[in-house]
Image (cartoon, rainbow, N blue to C red):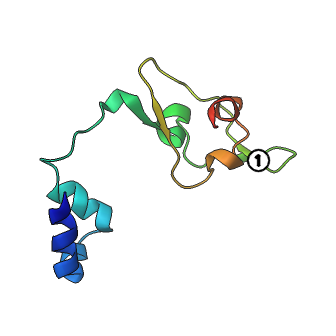
Amino acid sequence: MNYLWNEFKENPNRVLQNKHGDQDWITKRAKEDITWFPDQWIRSYKWEMIGLKDTKLLNKDGKKFFRTPATVEKGNKVAVFHGSPNPMECADEWVQRNWK
């Protein structure tokens, strides 16, 4: 999708105007050329697998965890970590078993 780079390079200010970042523009501009994963494959660790946004606790090693363990539904293939905790900061046993 070289056209994305060419358009961006021509006028980056116009591209990013009214957008939160380049990813928003790419998603909108290339929507016909993107093959999306099925929704059930991808889940937010904090919001969909845990269901809690800001109730992080710290264990004795300073790693973050939630009161509720992650729920992995059939068909989930990707856990998205955005913000804190990152996988390497997480004390959740499921994350530690699967983060390699």
Q: Quadrant of residue 96?
A: top right
Specify few, some or many for label 1: CA neighbours under 10 Å numbering under 14, 14-19, or 20 or more. some
Which residue is most to the front? 2
Q: Nearer the viewer, residue 66 or 11?
A: 11
* Apparent side of residue 36 relative to residue 82 in the rendered image (left or right): left
* Apparent side of residue 97 relative to residue 17 in the rendered image (left or right): right
Residue 55 in view, yes or no:
no
Q: Which residue occupies 87% across, 45% down?
A: 60
Which residue is most to the right? 60
Give the percent coordinates (x, y) of residue 70: 59, 29
Which residue is most to the top? 74
- Numbered label tally: 1
Amino acid type assigned to the residue bearing label 1 in the image:
Lys
Q: Nearer the viewer, residue 28 or 33?
A: 33
Q: Nearer the viewer, residue 6 or 86?
A: 6
Q: Which residue occupies 71% across, 30% down?
A: 93
Q: Is residue 12 above or below residue 88?
A: below
Reading the image, the residue beneath label 1 is 63
The quarter of the rendered structure image containing the C terminus is top right
Q: Is residue 22 above or below residue 61?
A: below
* Apparent side of residue 80 relative to residue 7 in the rendered image (left or right): right
* Apparent side of residue 83 relative to residue 2 in the rendered image (left or right): right
Q: Which residue occupies 56% across, 40% down?
A: 52
Q: Which residue occupies 62% across, 50% down?
A: 86
Q: Could you say whether the residue bearing mark 1 is in a helix, strand or loop?
A: loop
Residue 89 in view, yes or no:
yes
The quarter of the rendered structure image containing the N terminus is bottom left
Q: Quadrant of residue 7?
A: bottom left
